[in-house]
Image (cartoon, helix red, strand yellow):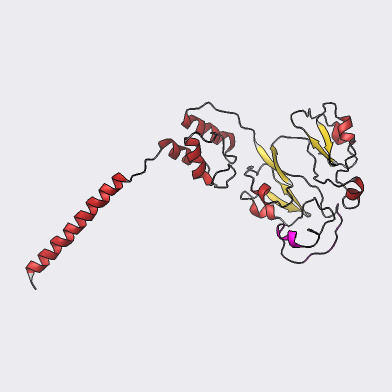
Amino acid sequence: MNMTAIIAATVLVAAVGLFIGIFLGVAGKKFEVEVDEKEVAVREALPGNNCGGCGYPGCDGLAAAIAKGEAPVNGCPVGGEPVGKIIAAIMGQEVTETVRMRAFVRCAGTKERTKELFEYTGVEDCEMMAFVPGGATKGCSYGCIGFGSCMKACPFDAIHMYNGVAVVDKDACKACGKCVAKCPRHLIELIPYDQTPVVHCSSHAKGKGVTENCTVGCIGCKKCEKNCPAGAITVTDFLAHIDPEKCTHCGACKEVCPRGIIQ
């Protein structure tokens, strides 16, 4: 074996390795991306659910936006006020009060309370029901379809189906908004955690159309509107709406509602 050739090959390999190492080191310095220490700290403070409820593409996106001053320090609905306080300290800002929100389903039309039009056998998915004649098995075209697309979309196991209607566990709900986006009939909205009373209906059908298909739906009789001493209730398109800013929680609307839909 030629020792000279072996030594030459070894030197060549070492030289190539040294050159590549130096090249990568220089390239790494030249193309190094500066890391915002505040962004890193904010990201570590976020819960990491990546639910998108903040309006940004996951926790990384929100952390970057907060560090740039483009998003509020309390922008994470999952972390709520505790996480907001930590991030406010990181950003050197004053702690802002956060109103806890929860999802609310504007329907109380369980199977016992609503008229069934037909027996359905097939894929149980609310969005798929848009392709079924009539749109659902229930007579009310405004109510909960009952196949749990919102329940499947919830990353916190805060929604369960009860006799054909989605019910939210408000203590488990993090107000991420995924259920809101998933419901094809737009029955779910985010409301303050402590908001009461609420109207468990979304029907805009006239009185007869409601009574024929549901035993609890709002018929737009305006009794709640007329008896509210604070003027917090208005009936528009045969459906009662409560303004939480004006509501004094007196309970008068609940007492006079003939359908028991205000709770």
- In the visual, does 167 lie left or right of 27? right
Tell me residue 150's x, y (percent). 68, 52
Is residue 94 in view?
yes
Quadrant containing the C terminus in the rendered view: top right
Look at the picture and state if 179 lies above or below 120.
above
Tell me residue 251's x, y (percent). 83, 32
Which is nearer the eye, 243 or 94?
A: 243
Please name the residue shown 58% across and 34% down the image.
Answer: 81
Please name the residue shown 90% across and 39% down the image.
Answer: 221
Over which residues does the magenta segment extend?
113-132
Total label count?
Answer: 0
Which is nearer the eye, 157 or 125?
A: 125
Tell me residue 157's x, y (percent). 64, 50
- In the visual, does 54 lie left or right of 202? left
Which is nearer the eye, 135 or 114?
A: 135
Please name the residue shown 85% across and 55% down the image.
Answer: 139
